[in-house]
Amino acid sequence: MCLKKVKEYNIDAIVIDDGSTDNTAAIAEQENVYLIRHSSNEGKGKALRNGFRLALKKWYDLIITLDADGQHDPNEIPSFINKIRNGNAGIIVGNRLYSPTGMPPITTFTPFFLNSSAI
């Protein structure tokens, strides 16, 4: 589970439950993390804005976002933190295309082509 792995790094976690129908909120409460709940699905953009807003209120100096559906590998957290803290980067954007997670090819390649057209 993504949240358990994140907690292994002894960092604060903010969970945004965007209207899920699973046990996201209950799991987050058990893990003693900050929890933001949307009563219905409001979309990734609003979830990110609400999470960033709380992170800014807490005066965090670093923010890492992860989707909890297996698209992002929490094992990359130390690498991201080290690159930022060592002055090797000001911002890091991970790319799931280089770390296959067993997602169907259409799920992997569609965002690549959509993102490429915006460049």
Image: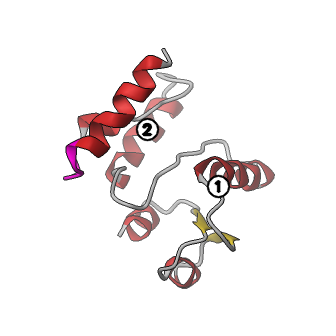
Q: Relative to 40, does residue 59 appear above or below in the rendering?
A: above
Residue 92 visible somewhere in the drawing: yes
Q: Nearer the viewer, residue 7 or 39?
A: 39
In the picture of the structure, the residue carrying the numbered disc 2 is: 80
Residue at x-position 80% and y-position 53% = 57
Q: Amino acid at mark 2?
A: Phe
Q: Nearer the viewer, residue 83 or 22?
A: 22
Q: Which quadrant is home to the N terminus?
A: bottom left
Crowding near pointer 1: few (<14 within 10 Å), some, many (20+)?
Answer: some
Crowding near pointer 2: few (<14 within 10 Å), some, many (20+)?
Answer: some
Q: Main secondary structure of the magenta part?
A: loop
Residue at x-position 72% and y-position 54% = 50
Q: The residue tagged with tag 2: helix, strand or loop?
A: helix
Q: Amino acid at mark 1?
A: Ala
Residue at x-position 45% and y-position 55% = 67
Q: Is residue 104 magenta?
A: yes
Q: Position of residue 17 (x, y in %)?
A: 59, 69
In the picture of the structure, the residue carrying the numbered disc 1 is: 47
Q: Earlier in the sequence, mark 2 or mark 1?
A: 1
Q: Position of residue 83 (x, y in %)?
A: 44, 31
Left or right? Give the position of 4 relative to 55. left
Mark 2 and mark 1 in contact? Answer it, CB < 8 Å. no
Where on the picture, by quarter, is residue 98? top left
Q: Relative to 82, does residue 4 appear above or below in the rendering?
A: below
The disc at residue 38 is none
Cα distance in 3D space between marks 2 and 1: 22 Å
Look at discs 2 and 1 and give the one toward the viewer.
1
Q: Nearer the viewer, residue 7 or 54?
A: 54
Q: Position of residue 93 (x, y in %)?
A: 46, 31
Magenta range: 101-105
Q: Position of residue 49 (x, y in %)?
A: 70, 48
> What colour scheme does the image use?
secondary structure
